Amino acid sequence: MRIATWNVNSVRTRLDQVSVWLAAEAPEVLCLQETKVADALFPHAAFEALGYRAVISGQKAYNGVAILSRLPMADVRVGFDALLPDDPAAVELGEQKRVISASIDGLRVLNLYVPNGSSLTSEKYPYKLAWLACLQRYLQAQEAEGEPLAMVGDFNIALESRDIHDPGRLEGGIMASDPERRALRAALGERLRDVFRVFEPDSGHWSWWDYRTGAWDMDRGWRIDHIYLCDQLLACATGCVIHKAVRGNDQPSDHAPVVAHLAWPPESAEGEDDDW
């Protein structure tokens, strides 16, 4: 199974680019962020023509998440309050469409668009920290269910110095501040690991290049699009790749797709299903 994540920065604006990439790469699952479209206007037909069903949680002009899958999806959950119905913060944070998950082939795929935070002095910064704290509670509830988890998305956080082109200048600022990093690490706990870093320990690998300041031309990027796996899935991982070339398209998203390759389901599980 290949699970991909891509902040497309408007699914309708990038529809042709996403369709071309899907036709060429054909991952089993593609998680989209910043779809920026109300549910009624989501381009289902274009993806269905390529063999994908979509489950969505969108809003006009902002945010929005979707999961596209060539495999059957079940038990689709939208928002933090799907697992935290009595958590007032989970209900309030659900007003922005940033969380969706589905059960696919025996594992749970959780797609997130973490708030950016804008700046350390913005009112959006404490919102981001509250959102990450809610994510921690959500993941604890999900872990209690015992379902293997792949958590993917645009995290808007460079977790380490090697995830930024110029850490000396940028660390401590938005997307690289200590409170953000601590909050994400607390949510991950001991359970979830960054699959990209299992295969690539070095710096110089980015998934996002700011539209401003010529970042793409000078390759001054950040790695903020992540795929985190529980131990059961990590043991099945065979690779993780950033499809950097897509960022060089005409009128591209400022993010590139990231794809994790998993030998899933395990052979023993396949055999058990066949016997049943």
Image (tube, rainbow, N blue to C red):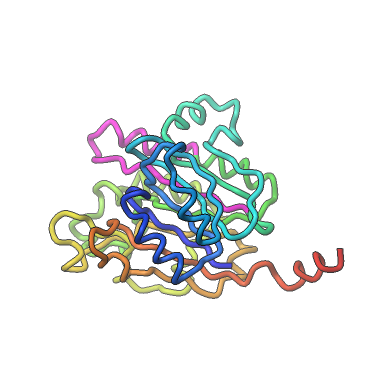
Q: For the N terminus, which image quadrant?
A: bottom right
Q: Position of residue 22 (x, y in %)?
A: 45, 65
Q: Is residue 200 above or below residue 16?
A: below
Residue sitting at the far right:
276
Q: Position of residue 81 (x, y in %)?
A: 56, 32
Q: Position of residue 13 (x, y in %)?
A: 31, 50
Q: Residue at x 58, y 66 (%)?
A: 234
| Horizontal side, residue 30 vs residue 206: left or right | right
Task: Choose top left, top right, bottom left or bottom right for residue 85.
Answer: top right
Q: Nearer the viewer, residue 197 or 270?
A: 270
Q: How many labels does the image show?
A: 0
Q: Which residue is drawn at 58% across and 69% down?
A: 262
Q: Is residue 138 above or below residue 211?
A: above
Q: For the C terminus, which image quadrant?
A: bottom right
| Horizontal side, residue 155 vs residue 198: left or right | left
Q: Which residue is drawn at 25% across and 67% down?
A: 248
Q: In this view, does 145 lie above or below 27?
A: above
Q: Residue at x 67, y 59 (%)?
A: 105
Residue sitting at the far left:
213
Residue 147 part of the magenta segment? no
Q: Is residue 22 above or below residue 63?
A: below
| Horizontal side, residue 68 vs residue 107: left or right | left
| Horizontal side, residue 32 vs residue 84: left or right | left
Q: Where is residue 23 in the image (x, y as percent from the top left)?
A: 45, 68
Q: Nearer the viewer, residue 80 or 199?
A: 80
Highlighted magenta segment, given as a residue range: 108-134
